[in-house]
Amino acid sequence: MKHLPADQRPREKLLARGPAALADAELLALLLRTGTAGQGVLAMAQAVIDRCDGFAGLLQAEARTALAGVRGLGPAKQAELLAVAEIARRAVTQPLRQRPVFDHPQRVKEFLALQLDGHGQEHFGVMFLDAQHRLLRFDILFSGTLTQTSVYPREVVRLALRHNAAAVVLAHNHPSGVAEPSRADEYLTQSLASALKLVDVRVLDHIVVGRGQTVSLAERGLM
């Protein structure tokens, strides 16, 4: 980056104008620090963003595989980026563990989008909550084509009891990118709510995650 004017170099630009002034590749270049022979650090940063389909992809479980395919990005740089991604995930999760999740409904959606957006196949996860509706843990339980027959209520019930949960928030993604709930999603919600009610565990919501969007079945009046 030495060929750039001083005020256009990411570090100097950040110090002078703040981090919001930097483009995605510039922010990432600050973490990567150096490029490789024939490829500057800005080009490498852009390659990471393209490979992961943006910062959201960098926060997904598949990011490790995606980063391995970036030319010149060695194990040390991969580890640094994965560590930063995990810090971001934990930063979003921490308030949900400390306060009732529905004190911050938008943060719940952001958390679930972080966990589920960008996957190439459907994943079904559950937020297990304590009696004060604070997050105990989040688990992805099922993957593939989700139907009433492929999501097993008894497994959800078993884990709710294991974690001593008082309530749950259900969530799954639509790989198509469209977060509109289907009739199958409604039926699945009803089936799980009935099973969990038998062990005194409430289903508070079911969030559908699409590309850059989330839809709450509770807000839609569908449960």
Image (spheres, helix red, strand yellow):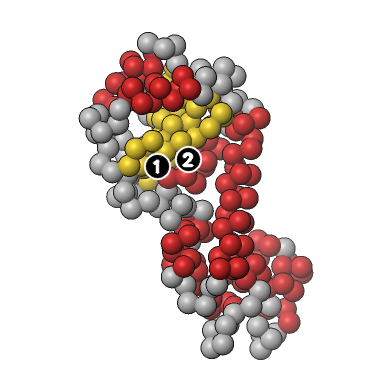
Q: Are marks 1 and 2 in contact (CB under 8 Å)?
A: yes
How packed is label 2: few (under 14 Cα within 10 Å), some, or many (20 or more)? many
Numbered badge on residue 112: 2
Q: Is residue 7 left or right of residue 24?
A: right
Q: What SS does tag 2 mark?
A: helix
Q: Of 9 and 198, which appears nearest the observer? A: 198
Residue 169 at least partly seen: yes
- Mark 1 crowdedness (10 Å alpha carbons): few <14, some 14-19, many ≥20: many
Task: Give residue 209's mark.
Answer: 1
Q: Position of residue 196 (x, y in %)?
A: 38, 17
Query: Residue at position x 38%, y 36% from top?
Result: 141
User: How far from the left and from the top, in percent, is residue 8?
Assistant: 68, 78
Rendering quarter of residue 65: bottom left
Q: Residue at x 43, y 70 (%)?
A: 69
Check the picture and name the quadrant holding the N terminus. Answer: bottom right
Q: Is residue 43 above or below residue 98?
A: below
The quarter of the picture where the C terminus appears is top left
| Type of amino acid under label 1 | Val
Residue 173 picture quarter: top left
Q: Is residue 167 visible?
A: no
| Relative horizontal placement of residue 189, taking residue 37 as reference (left or right) | left
Q: x and y percent of residue 72 in the render?
A: 52, 78
Residue 188 at x, y percent in the picture: 29, 27
Identify which residue is drawn at 53% across, 73% down. 73
Going from the N terminus, do you reach mark 1 or mark 2 first?
Answer: 2
